[in-house]
Image: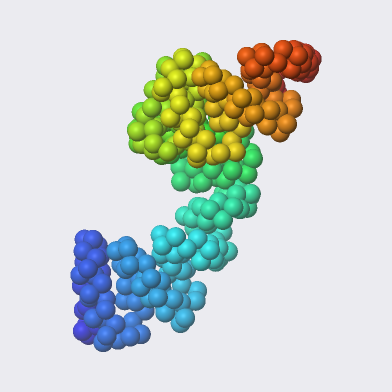
Amino acid sequence: MNEADDFLRKGVAAQQRNDLNAAIDNYRKALAIDPKLAEARANLGAALSAAGQFDEAIEEDNKVLVSAPGNLGVRMNLGLAYYKKGDTENAHTAFEAVHAARPQDVAAAVLLGYTDINLGKSNQAAAMLTPLENGRESNMDLEYVLAYALINSGEQAAGLPRMEKVAKATRSADAYFIAGTARLRRREFHEARADLDAAIDLHGNFPELYTMAGQARDALGDTPAAQSAFEQALKQDPKDFTANLYLGAMHLKQRDLDSARPMLELALQLQPANPMARLQMAKLNGMTGKYTEAAATLEDLEKADPNWLDPHIELAAIYYKLHRPDDGQRERGIVQQIEASQQKAGPSKQ
């Protein structure tokens, strides 16, 4: 065995025991002796990627592929290095080449699916992964990416059961969160709460988790549990718009105006044009004697959405406080018209 092969052997042994620095050093010594030793260069690329040195890994992988473009293992490693670096476009190109050559390679397909989703091509990911599912329903990596792609492409009815299956099988807070968020958007509040509460039980610090859980609990009328969730959300992120808005509105309903005001003011500062934030601030102004300010906001909201009931209800009361009974009576009439129209239309089909 020549000296280059000896360094290669030492590099492999070091990599197997996860001593990446020693592996990288030995592979480089091997290549210094024999620059054409392809195995050493391929292994060097993999070791550099594992060590988080992605640019160097990409450089070594590309050197191998110049002379061996059909080396799919190295191309897969190249895609992984790009993916870990955050270069989704180039990662997609590499994984796509591997998938084209080995369409039944599930690992390559899963990674290609991830990059498709990240590039806003969830439809393509779902179409590519669906044919691979038959007989592989127990492969949770495949099921997760397929479920995510289906949910993102609007096929929630197909994606949600898969995502919840993955969540239960792998006890994944991430999977429960994705499923719960989708359920919440579908107004399936009981299912959303179950998924989001399961995620909380598994991982209490998941970003936005408490905010979503609070909304599900609030929609089910469980105000104390919702309030607790929003309070936890604000501990994680004091500038969480939704948590500030909901919690501020809850304090307002409880007539705890001192607690409501800073939250509603911050929500409005974060999203000045948000209709719900403006409505809640108008309610607060109305409750604290700032009738002119409240009326101006409510009138703007009415103009923007004439069929939104809440501004008309609030404005009717404000007009009476401003000693404008004719305007107040007019608003009451509009409220009655909207309510009659809503009753005629029946329950929302969302």
Residue 59: image quadrant is bottom left
- Whether residue 152 is visible, yes or no, is yes
The residue located at (55%, 34%) in the rendering is: 182
Residue 6 figure quarter: bottom left
258 vs 24: above or below: above
Camera-nearest residue between 254 and 23: 254
How many numbered callouts? 0
Q: Quadrant of the C terminus?
A: top right
What scheme was used to colour the molecule?
A: rainbow
The residue shown at (39%, 33%) is: 234
Horizontal side of residue 44 vs 111, given as left or right: left
In the image, farthest residue toward the front: 323
Pick the quarter of the image with the N terminus: bottom left
Q: Measuring from the top left, give residue 323's x and y in whole percent.
A: 67, 14
Point out residue 86 in the picture as x, y percentages from the top left corner: 44, 60
Please tell me whether residue 68 is drawn above or below residue 206 in the rendered image. below
Residue 119 position in % (x across, y down): 56, 56
Q: Is residue 335 visible?
A: no
Q: Is residue 299 left or right of residue 21?
A: right
Residue displayed at 21% across by 84% down: 3
Q: Residue at x 49, y 55 (%)?
A: 111
Nearest the viewer among 69 and 150 is: 150
93 above or below 302? Answer: below
Query: Viewer-proximal residue, 264 or 120?
Result: 264
Residue 97 drawn at (x, y percent): 55, 66
